[in-house]
Image (spheres, rainbow, N blue to C red):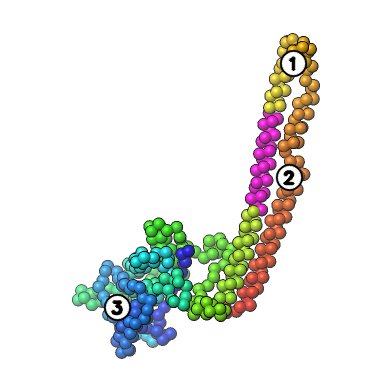
Amino acid sequence: MAIYHLSTKPISRSSGRSAVASVAYRAGIKITDDRLGKTYDYTKRNGVLWTGLATPHGLNIDRNELWNLAEKTETRSNSRTAREIVINIPHELMQGDQSAGKMLAYEFATNLSQKYKIAVDVAVHAPDKQGDNRNYHAHLLLTTRQITQEQDGRFELGKKSQLEMSNTQLKQAGLLSNQDELVELRRTWAELANTYLAEHGLDERIDHRSHADRGLLTLPTVKMGWQATELERKGIKTDVGDHNRAIKAYNEQVLTYQALRQQARQAEQAERQRQEQTRRQAQLEMAKVVKKAQTRENARKSPLEPQKSKNGINIPPTPKNTLKTQNRAIYSDNLLSSKQYHQNLAFLQEFDERVEKIAQNILANQLQVLKKRANPF
């Protein structure tokens, strides 16, 4: 099953990080930070499947120049020098030569580059050996400023990109807020990934919306991380593992409750359909009786000789109360009484209320368990 994940965080000097060191590690390359005079060499690291660089209008700049320019442009000690976006690539697209998944990640990076006029460095990674073997993912490192090339060939990082502007600045420019823009990013990634899945004949789809927005009563699990996954595989329980197990247990109970409630609704609907069918059948039978009675009544009024049997004996006329007697017999044999119907309806309503009460108790118990874990991560 394809798994949705998109997260973003800044690369900031205030946290001791640099854009040069970050790209060296994610791309598995050797690069020197000119500002610090420090070289980072990650050429021996494993797990980097593919790298690429997307720029607006196809600007031709190499990583070394780009990320040293990003460090040089920012002068404050707490400056943001890059922004990272991490996306899960559907593992179904990473089969064979893995070209579909790699092109998906690069097309998304290209879309970001064109929309925000920034450079986007892409590194596609294999799953961690200790983690989930379906966890193919990509690290996208974005410049915080728009990139341009001057007439003399020099590259410059000028205006802050939309992703780095404050909500006040965004509002003045008539743009979406940071929160709304993140939702738009998540939607764009889901739609692009689903397009690739469909083009490759795959039925799996991902959804960027939260469980609440999708109208689901179930709760989402949290990302384990390779450290917790490795410990769990060794039989060592972790807080995040316990947290996810509690959520899965709750989700199973919610699904059971929903199934029971659906069964009750189907039973009620089936009973209503049966009642309606019986009522219609009774009406049809009644119509036949009425028609037959009318025929006899017309025959009675007609100046005809009395009918005789084969042995010449006259056939007596039909009694006047025959219609009412037959009507009552047909209706009572085919249609439930009002009392029986309301008894059935009351039973279904009582069953529905009982199921709902059980589900509420389940939810209360599980929430109490989760509240006891102040920091499940």
Please state the total of marks drawn on the protein image.
3
At x 19%, y 76%, the residue is 152
Q: Amino acid at mark 3?
A: Arg
- Main secondary structure along the magenta-highlighted residues: helix
For the residue pair 183 and 62, the one nearer the viewer reads as 62
Going from N to C along the chain, the mark reached first, 1 or 3, is 3
At x 73%, y 52%, the residue is 347
Instruction: Check the image and report above or below for 354 versus 267.
Output: below
Distance from Cα at disc 1 to Cα at disc 2: 41 Å
* Residue behind mark 3: 63
**Residue 183, percent across and down?**
45, 66
Residue 95 picture quarter: bottom left
For the residue pair 206 and 248, the one nearer the viewer reads as 248
Is residue 177 visible to the viewer in this orientation of the structure?
no
* Residue behind mark 2: 341
Is residue 5 visible to the viewer in this orientation of the structure?
yes
Residue 173 picture quarter: bottom left
Crowding at mark 1 (Cα within 10 Å: few <14, some 14-19, many 20+): some
Q: Amino acid at mark 1?
A: Arg
Label 3 residue SS: helix
Please state if 101 lies on the left or on the right of 360 as rendered: left
* Residue behind mark 1: 300
Label 1 residue SS: helix
Q: Magenta residues, as a range? A: 264-287
Label 2 residue SS: helix
Instruction: Check the image and report above or below for 233 versus 212.
Output: below
Please state if 369 lies on the left or on the right of 77 as rendered: right
Residue 128 picture quarter: bottom left
Q: Amino acid at mark 2?
A: Tyr
Going from N to C along the chain, the mark reached first, 1 or 2, is 1
